[in-house]
Amino acid sequence: MIGDLAMSSSDTSFTEIPADGRHHVKSMLMRESLLDKKVMSSTETPVVRMLPFAHVIKVGGRSIIDNGRKATYPLVDALAAALDKFKLVIGLGGGIRSRHVTSIGMDLGLPTGVLAQLRIIDALGNAHLLGTLLAPYGVVAIPPEILGHMLPFFIKSAPGVICNGDPPFSIWEHPPRLGRIPPHRTDAGTFLLAECYGCATHTLIKDVDGLYDADPNANPNANFIKEITVSELKERNISTLPFDRVLIDLLACARQVKCFQIINGLKPHLLEPALRGEHVGTIVRQDAS
């Protein structure tokens, strides 16, 4: 009887039962250290693009919303027109109120993670403001708590959705190398959203034409930069940027979003060309592989 039940080690149908009697899930990573460089490189595999038809837009709080009706209403009209042709995910920045609360928080000695949580509230307020103006066109405001889970449903059901642009790091925000200002703000948050869902484009709507080698508001002789790569941007080490500086490193590591474009929201007619992929501002590209 025992001889009949015995199986040779060459029988591939035989599954060894561990000494502890428990069943283990087979996995390529089950016996590996996730800190090993070879293991990390083995995970470089294709990624599913969940929303390749959607376009992510970041609307600046300070550059657009804080300027009131004169800046916001023309952009609302441009967004409404674009909704007839494009599925839009619109993220908002917190603007001057975020700067104010950050200043108070730093004066009180609050850590970076708490500052990040406070900033989310202001960006959410601006999302409600712009969301109200876009509500007649079918745009839906999604609460942060369900955005990650419900975005595919809402973007298939409505022409566009709107949300605060901050990533949900909150108290888990990365501490910056210099100072205490949260490095992952609304530019970075909307980029991470576009990267995760594999969206078609990522567009930053500011109050300047794009990237300059100096602040154009302070230096009228600043030179406009039409296009630049991540490595070139790092090499030039421009002192001030119209977007979150951490976005440079995020773009360098991105798998699905290979570039983003900065356009002037005070020229709302540029929105649709940007969504079509036309070069109407500054394009920052990932280095060619």
Image (cartoon, rainbow, N blue to C red):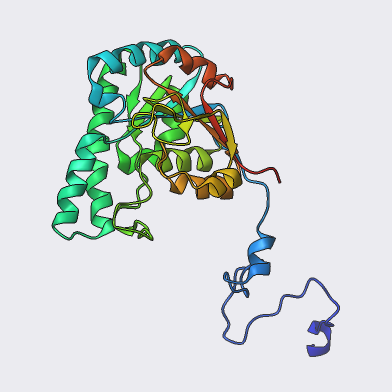
Q: Which residue lies furthest to the front in this view?
A: 221
* Residue drawn where x is 47% and y is 32% of the image: 211
Q: Position of residue 17 (x, y in %)?
A: 66, 80
The answer to which quarter of the image holds residue 53 is top right
Q: In the displayed structure, does residue 98 sit left or right of residue 91?
A: left
Q: Can residue 193 be seen in this view?
A: yes
* Residue drawn where x is 25% and y is 44% of the image: 119
The answer to which quarter of the image holds residue 251 is top right
Q: Where is residue 165 in the image (x, y as percent from the top left)?
A: 35, 37
Query: Closer to the camera, 194 or 2?
Result: 194
Q: In the displayed structure, does residue 78 sit left or right of residue 103?
A: right
Q: Position of residue 81 (x, y in %)?
A: 43, 10
Q: Where is residue 141 in the image (x, y as percent from the top left)?
A: 31, 28
Query: Closer to the camera, 156 or 216?
Result: 216
**Above or below for 192 versus 38:** above
Q: Quadrant of the N terminus?
A: bottom right
* Residue drawn where x is 54% and y is 43% of the image: 233
